Image (tube, rainbow, N blue to C red):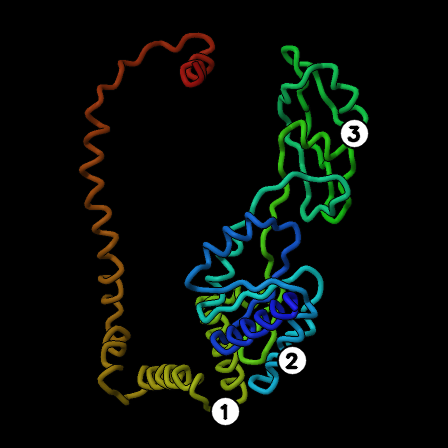
Amino acid sequence: MVVSQKKTNYVNQFRNLCEEFKRILVVNADNVGSHQMQQVRKALRGSATIVMGKNTLMKKAILLHKEQNAKLNALTNYLKGNVGLVFTNDDLSKVRDVLVTNKVSAPARQGAISPVDVFIEPVNTGLEPTKTSFFQALNITTKITRGTVEIVNKVHLVKKGDKVGNSEATLLQMLNVKPFSYGLVVLQVYEDGAVFDPSILEITEAVLSQKFYAAVNNVASVSLALGIPTEASLPHSIINGFKDLLSVAAVTDVSFKEAEEVKAYLKDPSKFASVTAAPATASTSKEPEKKPETKKKPEPEPEPEPEGGDDDVMGGLFG
């Protein structure tokens, strides 16, 4: 009877959360301890609520909520394994970032599947020379330095996706290396009846703007090539038309306000020289101030060149 009441309370709470929150993250909780879960809940307090439980019970709660929100049925396909649900109305990217930052370093246990490549850097281990045979069994080159074992080369100890062996786990424990980090990992994202991959959360406003402008450029290019005016190609068409008008005005008597300056330059090319010469004059005007400084240095009186004079000069440069 007590168990039945707990399930009823769980389903009612689940239903209330489904009504209150519109966004849900499906997270994997493998290797996440109770203390770490408590820290994550604390970090999300006020912005999100984490719900854990048996997958069958969560599926049942969703089915009982079908009348109020049939869109939640899409979540039932992803309730597999050790998973939980994070309910929120806040920005999904911010909630995801909180989950990512609350990871805990963990040692490599024997039999565990390595989520990353594990490397051992060249370092003095501080271990006694009696441990040399242990390193030799793992094909790790070592030498004895000041009475301790030193790893000579960088070693790829465990590859990503491989099981951690007993020797590898023991070595990492002796070196006090914790290569793994565990936390809640976002598997799927639910919002307004749609379930999508969490990589969508990586798309920022800057990325969207870049993609939008690239698409606009493509539309403008196609429109110009086909001669079909569009809102994207119109500014380019106006500029190109204006260039054509300037070209016509330059070789005919036709003139308008914007073309007068161009025609004036073509009529008197010296105006081009005056414009381009201005920066050059500004730069050359500074040279006389520097030249006298170099000339102030007294030049040594000429002396008879000794034998091997060139070698003496080079000796002055490299001495």
**Secondary structure state at the residue bearing disc 1:** loop
Image quadrant holding the C terminus, namely top left
Rendered residue at 54%/88% (across/down): 226
Q: CA distance from mark 3 to mark 1?
A: 69 Å
Furthest-right residue in this view: 137
Crowding around mark 3 (Cα neighbors within 10 Å: few <14, some 14 to 19, many 20+) is few
Q: From this viewpoint, which residue is outermost toward the front?
A: 1
Pointer 3 residue: 138
- Distance from the alpha carbon under mark 2 to that under mark 3: 53 Å
- Location of residue 35 in the rendering, given as x and y in whole percent from the top left corner: 55, 47
Between label 2 and label 1, give the one nearer the viewer: 2
Q: Earlier in the sequence, mark 2 or mark 1?
A: 2
Q: Position of residue 291 (x, y in %)?
A: 22, 34
Q: Label 1 near label 3: C-beta < 8 Å? A: no
Query: Is residue 101 in sight in this rendering?
Result: no
Above or below: residue 201 compared with residue 100: below
Percent coordinates x, y for residue 140 in the rendering: 75, 27
The residue that mark 1 highlights is: 228
Pinpoint residue 290: horizontal percent, then vertical percent.
21, 35
Residue closest to the eye, 39 or 149: 39
Residue 246, numbered label? none
Q: Which mark is residue 63?
A: 2
The numbered mark, 3 or 1, whose residue comes first in the sequence reads: 3
Residue drawn 61% across and 84% down? 66
Q: Amino acid at mark 1?
A: Ile
Looking at numbered disc 3 in the image, what kind of residue is underneath it? Leu
Q: CA distance from mark 2 to mark 1?
A: 53 Å
The quadrant holding residue 10 is bottom right
Residue in front for this viewpoint, 131 or 226: 131
Q: Quadrant of residue 276?
A: bottom left
Q: Quadrant of the N terminus?
A: bottom right
**Amino acid type, callout 2:** Leu
